[in-house]
Image (cartoon, grey):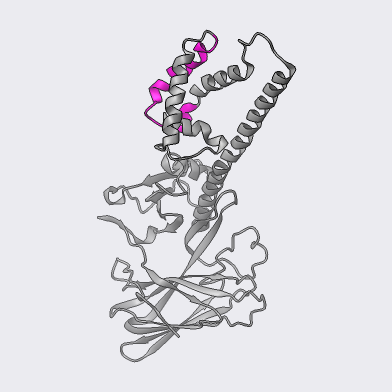
Amino acid sequence: LSIYINFMLEPFAVLVANDHIVHIILTAAVVLLAIIALFSDTRRTPVAFTIIALLPVVTLCRAQYLYLPAVGILWSVSLLIRNPGQETRTVTGDVARWILAIALIFILFFHHLDKQRPWHHSGWVAQTVGDALQVFHPVPQDGTRFILINPPQNNRLKMGVFQNGFAEAVRLWYQNPSLDGLTVPHPDTFTGIDPTRDIVIQCSGAEIREVSAVWTADPPRVRQPVTITPGILLDGNRMEADIAIPNERIAGLAIHSKLAHATDIEQGTVVARFEAECRDGHRETFELVAGVHTAEWAIDREDVIGICRHRRAPVIASSVMGHAPHRPALNHLYRAEWRLSATESIVRLNIRSLLGKDSETGNHPVLDIREIELLMDDGDDEIQTTPASDTPSFR
């Protein structure tokens, strides 16, 4: 009862803990007044209606279960304002009643508008998730099934689209009734993967990640690249980083990165140079190119579309950013694969940013290298992921 009273008082911002002494006294007073009202000819019916409607849900404590009892509650409030048992009425009293009634209506109306905002934002987030899927797969084949691994449970992305409406959402996003969707909250027990038709997406908090290529069905699991901690941020003040690589024979590296403040960087501009020193002494280099291997993280944001001079690189993950009441945006992470000339053991990796301080934009572009993934031999069907360094050294 204390929780339900809290729900009813929410429009008036009288919010203290449900077990607070004020709420306990208030709850006891409301119960006592309800009992007294049952002996009143004019107030017995609405109070009895409220009690009967509330009894089946009194232990469930969900705001939506107040919809029906609210009829009796507002009925009782209207009787208190109108006071039909009063024999003599005055103009002052009637004016006060009108003012009180109109004030209550306006308070509840504006509270109603305020409560709509999270639902509007929830709809925007759902559409933004759809936008992320369409970045990965703009035109999926008919009959494709999207499998969402680890759908959100207790964060700001929690909404019906992930609980019981994912298949319908996929069809709406793509306007294709032949598509299907499935959410898998417990991937370790799921064995129904069909590699010929399924696209596997992993959700980690607000991040949506394409993982079809690294999904294995027996036993089912998703191998997720290990994030470098702290991430490597290269800008005009920190231009170079040295990373120690575990002593393994690898076929190449997958570099997951993004740019910031980089809308003026032209398509094809080399933004960083990677140099690998191998165990046998020879060196190999790789150039990270804007619009090919990496790109502006907000390239799909409304205020960035049309002004960015380079294109979107292949996206490996997208995070949904932004809180109500603002419309969310996608924060992209891009994937570049660097295949070595031979399977080698790399002992040292040097990364040098080519984004100098003298940028035309004046915003000093930043290269954010979030993850580095070790790619094994083509003959090995598993893609190993290893942290490039627990604590990268910078110079």
The one of 182 and 35 positioned closer to us in this rendering: 35
Which image quadrant for residue 55?
A: top left
Residue 263 location (% of width, % of height): 63, 70
Residue 189 visible to the viewer: yes
The residue nearer to you, when weighing 307 against 49, is 49
Q: Is residue 263 left or right of residue 231?
A: right
Which quadrant of the view contains residue 75? top right
Measuring 35% from the left and 61% from the top, which residue is drawn there? 214
Of 332 and 154, which appears nearest the observer? 154
Q: Quadrant of the C terminus?
A: bottom left
Q: What secondary structure is the stretch in magenta mostly built from?
A: helix
What segment is highlighted magenta in the picture?
42-66
Residue 2 forms part of the magenta stretch: no
Where is residue 216? Give x, y as percent.
30, 58
Query: Is residue 223 placed above or below 107 in the rendered structure?
Result: below
**Residue 92 at x, y = what percent?**
73, 20
Residue lying farthest to the right in this orientation: 91
> Where does the N terminus fall, quadrant-wise?
top left
